[in-house]
Image (spheres, grey):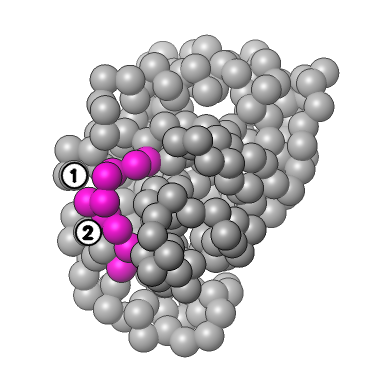
Amino acid sequence: MKYSLNHMNRCARYVITCLWIMCLAIMAGSAAVKADGAATLERDGRSYAVPLPRGYCDITTTPLGVLLHKFLADVTAANNLAPRVDIIFQNCAAEAIFPWGYVATNNLGGVINSQQVLNRMRADLFGQTELLEDLLEASGNVNIDTISEWGVDISEVTPGAPTIIWTDAHSIVTLVDSTVVVEGAKATERLISSGTVFDGLIFEFAIYDDKIENGIDVKATAVDLAKNGHELKLMNNGVSRQTSGTASQQKN
C-alpha cells in the first residue's frame, strides 16, 4: 500500500510539469457544454451519483477533459494499485486550465474496508497519528471554524509533504504543496484531495491549482471535500455490492 500512495504523490507532483507543456494554450472556454453540480460514474456494473465540489463543473467529455483524462490514465497505467480516474472537473468560472480536478475510484478487494482503516493508514504513512487523534476529538459538522480550531496551520505545511487537513467518519482530506521546474523555470502546484470509503471502493477527489499564494481557499475547499464524502453516501443510498450488514456500516 505504501508504494501505491507514494506513487500517486509522485504523479501529483509530475502532473503540473506535463500539463504546462501540453495544455498551456488550451483554455477552459471550450465550445463543449460543462455540467455543474453532480456527475455519474460506472464502476463494476454499478452506477454512482457523484457530488462535485462547490463551484466545479464536469468537463469529462470536453476536449480539455478528454486530454486530461488520457494524461492521467497514462501516468497511472504502470501501477495496477492506482485508482481509476472516472470524472474530470474544473472550476466553472475558470478562464485557464487551473483549478481543475478529478474523481477516481479504487477497488482494493477489501484490504481497506472502512473509513477508519483508510484514515489510520494515511495518518501512519504521513507520520501524523497524533493529528489524527486530535481531529477525532472535534465535534459537530465540519466547517472552516472547526478546521481552524482542530486542523493543521496551513502556513506551516512542509512543501512536498502530504499533510492531513481534516478527517472524520466520511472522509480524510490532505494537502500537498510542491515546486517543480518546467522548462528551466520554477512552477508551483497545490493539491487538495480527499478519500472516502463507500460500497467497497475508495472514492478519491482531487483538486489541483497552480498557485500556492492567492490561489484556491484551502480551508473552504477542505470543507467542500469533507462534506462530499457524506453527500456521496446520501446520494447513493441503496446502491451496494456488499451484504446488507457491511453496506449499512459503510453508509453510517
Residue at the spot 29% in from the left edge and 58% down from the top edge: 113
Marks 2 and 1 sit apart, C-alpha to C-alpha, by 9 Å
Q: Which residue is labeled 2 in the image?
A: 121
Q: Is residue 28 left or right of residue 239?
A: right
Q: Is residue 78 above or below residue 53?
A: above
Residue 111 lies in the magenta-colored region: yes
Vertical side of 248 occupied by 163: above or below: above
| Sooner in the amino-acid sequence: mark 2 or mark 1 | 1
**Amino acid at dot 1:** Met
- Check disc 1 and report its element: helix, strand or loop: loop
Image quadrant assignment for residue 154: bottom left
Q: Residue at x 28, y 44 (%)?
A: 108
Q: Residues within 10 Å of mark 2 (few under 14, many from 20)?
A: some
Most frequent secondary structure within the magenta stretch: loop
Task: Point out residue 2 in the picture as x, y percentages from the top left corner.
Answer: 17, 44
Residue interval drawn in magenta: 106-116
On screen, residue 111 versus residue 97, left or right, reads left
